[in-house]
Amino acid sequence: MAYGRGPAGGANMQNLVKQAQKMQEEMQATEKLLDEWEIVGTAGGEAVVVYMNAKKKIDGIEIDKEVIDPEDSEMLEDLILAAILDGYKKADAVYEEKMAKFGALGGGLGGGLGGLGGLL
């Protein structure tokens, strides 16, 4: 009974390392895709629009001048927050969908391959 010794054991380890390298490359490509994915969060019938990527990095905010009331800044603050939260919800859905194939190895934003990363 072989326990990773000899030619067969070495080949199995090589295959494991190759699979880990391939998965790491796929994860890196997916991470890049998430960086470039545009998410649009909205509130108030699109009176406030927030642009971000699937990793929740906000790239811009548009505010309709009609909702800017110097006497009611709290309403605008609430709309901005609502638009950000809408974007976060959409970003989470995209992130979960794209990273699901990596299972526990995904490890969150920029998670790498956990303990396998040291083998590569």
Image (cartoon, helix red, strand yellow):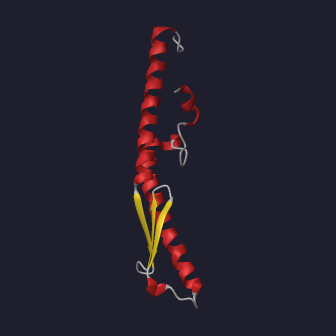
How many marks are shown on the rendered structure?
A: 0
Asked if residue 93 lies left or right of residue 108, the reply is: left
Asked if residue 83 lies left or right of residue 72, the reply is: left
- Residue situated in front as seen by the camera: 63 or 118: 63
Question: Measuring 49% from the left and 72% from the top, which residue is drawn there?
Answer: 83
Question: Measuring 45% from the left and 30% from the top, which residue is drawn there?
Answer: 21
Q: x and y percent of residue 104 in the render? A: 52, 42
Q: x and y percent of residue 117 in the render? A: 55, 32
The part of the image, by quadrant, that contains residue 73 is bottom right
- Residue situated in front as seen by the camera: 68 or 22: 68
Asked if residue 109 lies left or right of residue 37, the reply is: right
- Residue situated in front as seen by the camera: 66 or 23: 66
Question: Measuring 42% from the left and 43% from the top, which residue is drawn there?
Answer: 101
Residue sitting farthest toward the bottom: 71
Question: Measuring 44% from the left and 87% from the top, which residue is drawn there?
Answer: 66
Residue 22 in the image: above or below residue 81: above
The part of the image, by quadrant, that contains residue 23 is top left
Residue 50 in the image: above or below residue 10: below
